[in-house]
Amino acid sequence: MPGTATEVLNRLEPMTPPSSHSPIAPALPEPGFNFAYLDEQTKRSIRRALLKAVAIPGHQIPFSSREMPMSYGWGTGGIQVTASVIGQQDTLKVIDQGADDTTNAVNIRRFFRKVCGINTTDRTAEATVIQTRHRIPETPLREGQTMVYQVPMPEPLYFIEPSRTEANKMHALEEYGPMYVRLYEDVTRFGHIAMAYDYPVMVNDRYLMKPSPIPRFDNPKLHMSPALQLFGAGREKRIYALPPYTPVKSLDFEDHPFTVETWDQPCEFCGATDSYLDEVVIDDRGSRLWICSDTDYCHQRQQAQAIAPQTLG
C-alpha cells in the first residue's frame, strides 16, 4: 500500500486530547465522560490490536471487549473501534442498512455527539469516520476516510467448524477447501452460489475473511479501497482490518464466477439503476416498490435532478 502506511499509522496513533479552542467543534463533550466514553488505557489497547490487524490484513486479532451502555448486537464492537480512533477534528457518519435515519444509526450518532462533541453528517463525502452496519456507501470512498464495520460473527468458518481451536488451525494451514465445498453445494442445489450476504472473501491471497453482513453487492467495493477499513466484533472479542489498497477477492469457481445482484426496476425516487435497492411493501394488497438502500446517495441524486432543470431553464 505505497503512500498510505503513514496515513494508517497516524490514524491509529493515540489521539490528541480534544481542544476547547477547536474552531470546528460544534459542542463540548458531556461533562462526566472521558472523550469518546472509553478510558485512555482501553483505547490504547484497542489501537494496539488494530495495528496488528492492519499489519496482517484479514487476520482476526483478539481484544478485551469492554462493557458498553448498550446490549451486544447493537454494534458494541464497531462503537469501541470508533471510540478508539476518532478525534476531535473528525466528522462522523453512521449508517444502518444504508440509512442515516434508523434507530441504530440515530442513537449511535447521538451517543458520539454526547461523549465527543464532534461534528456529524449524513453526507458520505464529508465524513472522515463512517460507522456502518450491513452496507458500504454507494458514493466511492476516498483516502483519509475510515470505515468501521459492526460485525456480529467474525469467523467465516464457524458454520463449517464451530470449534475456535480447529478454525484457527485451518486459518494457519490455509485449509479453506471446506468453504469451497460449501459454495459448491449451492451450485449443485440451485445452479448458482446463493449466498446473498456474508459472502466470504480472500484477503491479500492469504486469509479467508467474513466481510460483516454486507450484501454481496458490496463485496467489489472492498477490493483496493482507498479507505482504511476496520471490523469490530464486540461479543466475539475480535478485530480485523483491511488497509487501503488491499486486494480482496470474492470466492468463486471458473465456471461459476462471482456475480452481484441486479434489479429489473430503478429506484422509485431517484431512478438509480446502479445502487442496491430495498423492496418495500406499500399496501395490504402486496404492492411493492424499490428504493435505494443508501439514503444519502438517493437524496443527492434527487437534489441534482431538481437543480438540473432550473440550470437548463
Image (cartoon, helix red, strand yellow):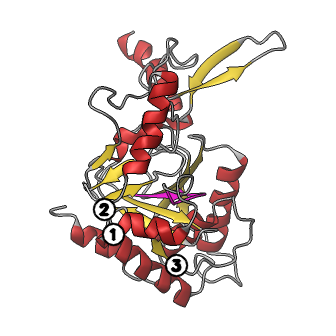
Mark 3, other Cα within 10 Å: few <14 / some 14–19 / many ≥20 = many
For disc 2, the marked residue is 243
Identify whether 54 is placed above or below 195: below
Callout 3 amino acid: Phe
Q: Quadrant of the C terminus?
A: top left
Q: Which mark is residue 54?
A: 1
Q: In the visual, does 18 lie left or right of 67?
A: left
- Residue 249 x/y as whole percent: 30, 45
Q: Of marks 1 and 2, which one's residue comes earlier in the chain?
A: 1
Q: Which residues are magenta?
A: 145-155
- The N terminus, quarter of image: bottom left
* Three-letter residue code for mark 2: Pro
**Residue at the (44%, 38%) spot, across then down:** 183
Instruction: Name the residue rendered at 25%, 51% in the picture.
Output: 247
- Does residue 290 appear left or right of residue 155 in this picture? right
Q: Are marks 1 and 2 in contact (CB under 8 Å)?
A: yes
Up-down: is 70 above or below 94?
A: below
Residue at the location (43% across, 47% down)? 179
Q: Is residue 154 above or below residue 13?
A: above
